[in-house]
Image (cartoon, rainbow, N blue to C red):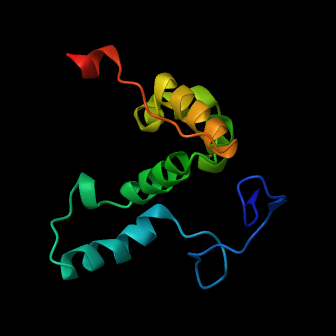
Amino acid sequence: MLPWRVPSGKPRRARLLLTTEAGTATRRDIFNHAWRPAVASAGLQLSRATGTHQLRHRYASVLLGSGQVNIRDLAEYMGHSDPAITLRTYIHLLPSAPDRARKAVEDAMAAEGKAVTPARTRRQRR
């Protein structure tokens, strides 16, 4: 079950994108059987960087990068038993707390129609 249309949408069961002829979930080894020739025909070397697991990481990074999905929800979508697993794996993709705070203030002031001149941090002044 995944949210429908928007990250906060009502969870909905959808048909699988990749299925067997019987309509069941495709096993990873079966998918890899088709994936490997596709990678080769694209002129790429099969490696960790071009493997099917990268699709999973791409999915997670797109969701986190959007800023619309939190770690708890992403953990559920990824099938992780504990959000801590997801956090440890993808924490590097989350914006830093100072960046989020700065953006929140900028957004609030922009909504009020006030010009925002970003202040330089100590690091930027050096």
In the rendered image, the quadrant that contains the N terminus is bottom right
**Which residue is pictured at 20% across the width and 64% down the height?**
46
In the picture as drawn, the residue positioned furthest to the front comes out as: 114
Residue projecting furthest to the right: 10
In front here: 9 or 24? Answer: 9
Q: Residue at x 74, y 71 (%)?
A: 14
Q: Position of residue 62 (x, y in %)?
A: 49, 54
Residue 85 visible in image: no
4 and 26: which is toward the camera: 4
Image quadrant where residue 82 sits: top right
* In this rendering, position of residue 52 left or right of residue 44: right
Residue 39 lies, with reference to residue 122, above or below; the image says below
Q: Residue 70: where, in percent of width, then height?
A: 64, 39
Quarter holding the C terminus is: top left
Residue at 63%, 37% (x, y): give it: 109
Q: How many marks?
A: 0
* Of the pair 86 and 114, the residue shown nearer to us: 114
- Can residue 4 be seen here? yes
Q: Position of residue 123 (x, y in %)?
A: 27, 17
Q: Residue at x 20, y 82 (%)?
A: 41
Q: Nearer the viewer, residue 54 or 62?
A: 62
Q: Position of residue 60 (x, y in %)?
A: 51, 49
Residue 54 in which image quadrant: bottom left
Is 102 on the left-hand or right-hand side of 55?
Answer: right
Position of residue 22 relative to residue 36, above or below, is below
